[in-house]
């Protein structure tokens, strides 16, 4: 996985999240269906059935949005990497290094001179 490109990793993680989301949604749907079967009144049973159906619809829509977002991010990343790989890098002229130790030594001498006065 160390050699894998990040767009592939993004897609894999989204797939894992989508699978987990749908698993939890099915568990909740099954719970509501069980409650509907155990319900004493017809109205209560119908309400639980509607909740089970709505749970699956909402979870499916959320999973679809999650997958689309992950695909968009992965495509964007892959495109950015292709552009970065094809763009030539300009060589910058090196600036002369500043003499920082000399400046520190000069400041230290000034500080000592002020303390001595």
Image (spheres, helix red, strand yellow):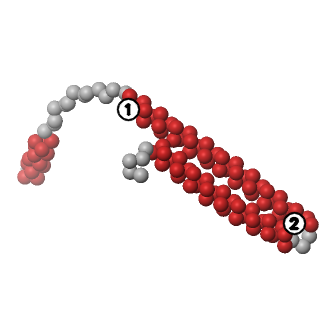
**Secondary structure of the residue carrying numbered label 2:** helix
Secondary structure state at the residue bearing disc 1: helix
How far separated are the C-alphas under marks 2 and 1?
Answer: 60 Å
| Up-down relation of residue 47 to residue 7 (above or below) | below
| Structural crowding at the residue carrying mark 1, measured as other residues with C-alpha within 10 Å and reported as few (<14), some (14–19) or many (≥20) | few
Dot 2 crowding, Cα within 10 Å, few <14, some 14–19, many 20+: some
In the picture provided, is 110 more to the left or to the right than 15?
Answer: left
| Residue 14 rendering spot, x and y as whole percentages | 56, 50
Judged left or right of residue 79, residue 46 is: right
Instruction: Tell me if residue 107 can be seen.
Output: no
Relative image position of residue 17 (x, y in whole percent): 58, 55
Could you tell me which residue is drawn at 45 percent across and 45 percent down? Answer: 6
Classify residue 22 by image quadrant.
bottom right
Residue for point 78% across, 60% down: 52
Q: Is residue 18 visible?
A: yes
* CB atoms of marks 2 and 1 within 8 Å: no
Q: Name the residue under label 2.
A: 45
Q: Where is residue 74 in the image (x, y as percent from the top left)?
A: 51, 41
Please state the horizontal and vertical placement of residue 93, each as a whole percent of the image.
Answer: 21, 27
Q: Nearer the viewer, residue 111 or 6?
A: 6
Q: Residue at x 61, y 42 (%)?
A: 68
Position of 76 with respect to 50 (left or right) is left
Which residue is identified by label 1? 85
Mark 2 or mark 1: whose residue is earlier in sequence: 2
Count of marks overlaid on the render: 2
């Amino acid at each position: 996985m160390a050699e894998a490109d990040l767009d592939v990793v993004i897609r894999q993680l989204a797939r894992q999240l989508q699978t987990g989301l749908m698993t939890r949604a099915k568990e909740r749907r099954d719970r509501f269906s069980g409650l509907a079967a155990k319900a004493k009144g017809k109205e209560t049973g119908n309400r639980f059935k509607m909740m089970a159906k709505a749970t699956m619809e909402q979870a499916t829509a959320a999973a679809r949005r999650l997958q689309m977002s992950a695909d968009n991010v992965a495509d964007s990343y892959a495109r950015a990497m292709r552009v970065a790989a094809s763009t030539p890098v300009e060589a910058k002229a090196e600036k002369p290094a500043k003499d920082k130790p000399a400046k520190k030594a000069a400041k230290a001498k000034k500080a000592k001179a002020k303390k001595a006065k």
